[in-house]
Amino acid sequence: MSRDAEIAAMRRAIELARPGVGRTAENPSVGCVILGPDGIVGEGATAEGGRPHAEERALAAAGAAARGATVLVTLEPCARRSGDGVSCTDRLIAAGVRRVVIACDDASVFASGEGEARLREAGVGVEKGLLEAEALSLYAEYRPARNNFTGS
């Protein structure tokens, strides 16, 4: 997978997240794109009201094509829980993704380094910081007070 393809996919994830800013309840609006060997196999954004999360929607769209894929997500995946009790981190691990590229850290108690650590422990490659400045513009209202929202 080329770096140009990853940059384009992260730009797409940011584009997916932008319309939801301020419309996803206490959760931030997140965008997620899943890249397989031949391009995008799934994408999603946090639903209005905050559930389902972007990763869940993208994984559902990708189906079995998520196995071995690279996931590009605007915010660190939640590690503790989602609406049905399964975290986005758990979903990514169970789907068998190879690598997760995160634009920026999540300031919430439901991720805040835990998502990244759990992915690494499961053998998933993790990269942080791709298009971070662009993604941070989505989360200005969430970042000033750490842990002020309930999940990514």
Image (cartoon, rainbow, N blue to C red):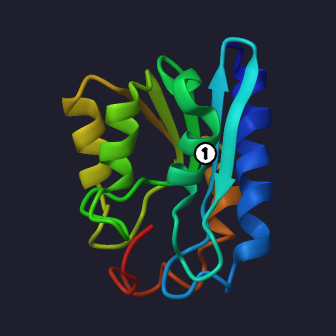
| Residue with the mark numbered 1 | 58
Q: Quadrant of residue 108?
A: bottom left
Q: Is residue 152 above or below residue 26?
A: above
Residue 129 shows up from this direction: no
Could you classify mark 1 by the number of other residues whose Cα lies within 10 Å: few (under 14), some (14-19), or many (20 or more)?
A: many
At 55% across and 34% down in the image, what residue appears?
Answer: 71
At 38% across and 87% down in the image, what residue appears?
Answer: 148
Q: Position of residue 131 (x, y in %)?
A: 67, 46
Q: Is residue 91 above or below residue 108?
A: above
Q: Position of residue 135 (x, y in %)?
A: 66, 59
Q: Position of residue 3 (x, y in %)?
A: 70, 20
Residue 137 shows up from this direction: yes
Q: Quadrant of the C terminus?
A: bottom left
Q: Quadrant of residue 50?
A: bottom right
Please, what secondary structure does the residue beneath circle 1 have?
helix
Q: Position of residue 7 (x, y in %)?
A: 74, 33
Q: Quadrant of the N terminus?
A: top right
**Residue 9 located left or right of residue 101:** right
Q: Is residue 109 above or below residue 45?
A: below
Disc 1 marks a residue whose amino acid type is Ala
**Residue 130 located left or right of residue 82:** right
- Which residue occupies the extreme left position in the image? 121
